[in-house]
Amino acid sequence: MNYLVKIAGAAALAAAFAASAVSAQTIRMGTEGAYPPYNFVNDNGEVDGFERDVGDELCKRAGLDCVWVTNEWDSIIPNLTSGNYDTIIAGMSITDERDEVIDFTQEYFPPDPSVYMALAGTTLKDGSVVAAQTATIQAGYLASSGYTLVEFATPDETVAAVRSGEADAVLADDAYLSDIVKASNGELAFTGDPVSIGGGVGMGIRESDTELKAKMNAAIDSIKADGTLSALIAKWFDGRVVNY
């Protein structure tokens, strides 16, 4: 059965799921639930989006029971390592820095360019204030750029900062910002040049969970080989063509 579980306290969840993920055949899939189309919470209060479809299919092929858990982005890695869930499937790019703390499966989504979005007609210059979500590859990039970084806990807050004038622009994944630009009726637009940061998107797994990583990698191989992953990318990312 697939259902949404809200984080209710580290100690309670860790005790409830003390058995290892693979031996129990129950996998808690940790996601943010706030980054469409990768993941979001729908009107029924359920995790939805590209990663819900991908994750459910991976668990089906791996013979595992998926339970979906939402967690705020800035603590999503610590709560994986402390045992509150067994995977991170949350639009997380594979980076060397993150790989020092957790392990990753192979990618299930290719590297996505990061783009700047601002009020229409805005031109960025040295010192411009650019928003990014805390603990993202975009925040790391901006910290060493010529722009002034302002960080927010959620993606929605970064966009709101642009609309309110608190920030001149936001830097985020193209796949996230594209739909926002399209829905803004000309209020918002891309500005400047896209930047390439980080690798593809993979599933985060504790370094000790080697059996789970192997199961998920085999399942990702399977959905790549038969075209299922390409079809899901096209479904959720405006017909984007990715061939494996």
Image (cartoon, rainbow, N blue to C red):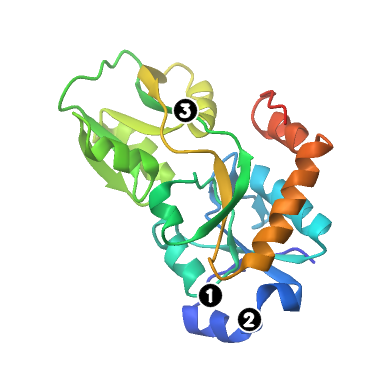
**Circle 3 SS class:** loop
Rendering coords of residue 75 (x, y %) = 41, 63
Tell me the residue at 36%/32% (across/down): 171
Mark 2 or mark 1, earlier in chain: 2
**Circle 2 SS class:** loop
Tell me the residue at 70%/56% (across/down): 216
Q: What residue type is labelled 3?
A: Pro
Q: How far apart, in angstroms, are the residues tagged by discs 3 and 2?
A: 37 Å
Q: Mark 3 points at which residue?
A: 113
* Quadrant of res 141: top left
Question: On the picture, is 45 further left or further right than 223?
Answer: left
Residue 83, disc: 1
Q: How far apart, in angstroms, are the residues tagged by discs 1 and 3?
A: 32 Å
Viewer-closest of 40 and 209: 209
Tell me the residue at 65%/47% (across/down): 51
Question: On the picture, is 123 further left or further right than 116?
Answer: left
Q: Mark 2 points at which residue?
A: 17
Label 3 neighbour load within 10 Å: few <14, some 14-19, many 20+: some
Q: Which amino acid does label 2 sit on?
A: Phe
Please determine whether, in this image, residue 100 is positioned above or below residue 226: below
Rendering coords of residue 218 (x, y %) = 75, 52
